[in-house]
Amino acid sequence: MKLTKTVKVLLIALLAVSCEKENPEIPHEHEVFSNVSLTLVPIGGSDEITFHWHDANGDLLVSNDEIENGSLVANTEYNAVISFNEQEEHDAHELHDDDGHEDHEDLDLDAEILNESTEHQLFFSSVKGLKISYSDVDSNGSPIGLETTFVTDDSFEGGELTITLRHEPIKNALGVASGNITNAGGETDVEITFSL
């Protein structure tokens, strides 16, 4: 009798273990975005305008002296490219600069975003007198946002532009393909603001 109860307990334990998920879902690990550059070139012109955001310690808190802003001109069309880099910290014995300090290497995240383009989209906040259009698409024909067109009209006087990179947005949700973040869902990888 005792043996039968022991066997039953063992069978129940084995069934419980065998019912566990074999491949548990791994949560999305956010990259550490340390450098973001937005470069605009006026169509028909050659003087590029560069905005730069630098997060020295990876806490997503950036002081004003770590942001380089720029100025756009009214009634102008720009080709815009945004680029993301992640700073990788190496062990002290691996890389050193001439002073013996730890060295850092910037990892290009653009290739990763393009490789997972169906899972990423950039969103741009509204600025009066500025229209932003997507120039790149993923394999499903949905926008990515690494390449865009900025067009200013005669009402443009500048403003704050917030750029948000979303991971796994609902790209077919209402308004998302045209850049409206309201119904996008997903998780924010990084959000930065430049003064135009």
Image: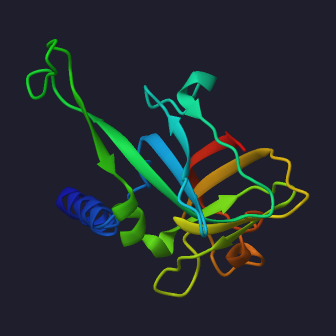
Residue 122 figure quarter: bottom right
Examine the rendering and report whether any part of residue 25 can be seen.
Answer: no
Q: Quadrant of the C terminus?
A: top right
- Image x and y of residue 62, in percent: 57, 28
Q: What residue do we see at 91% from left, 57% from top?
A: 155
Residue situated in front as seen by the camera: 82 or 191: 82
- Does residue 60 lie above or below 24 as drawn? above
Seen as rendered, the residue at the extreme bottom is: 140
- Image x and y of residue 98, in percent: 13, 17
- Does residue 160 lie above or below 15 as drawn? above
Seen as rendered, the residue at the extreme front is: 45
| Residue 85 horizontal side relative to residue 122, left or right | left
Residue 90 figure quarter: top left
Question: How many marks overall?
Answer: 0
- Image x and y of residue 94, in percent: 9, 28
Q: What residue do we see at 80% from left, 57% from top?
A: 74
| Residue 167 horizontal side relative to residue 35, left or right | right
Q: What residue do we see at 86% from left, 59% from top?
A: 129
- Image x and y of residue 2, in percent: 21, 56
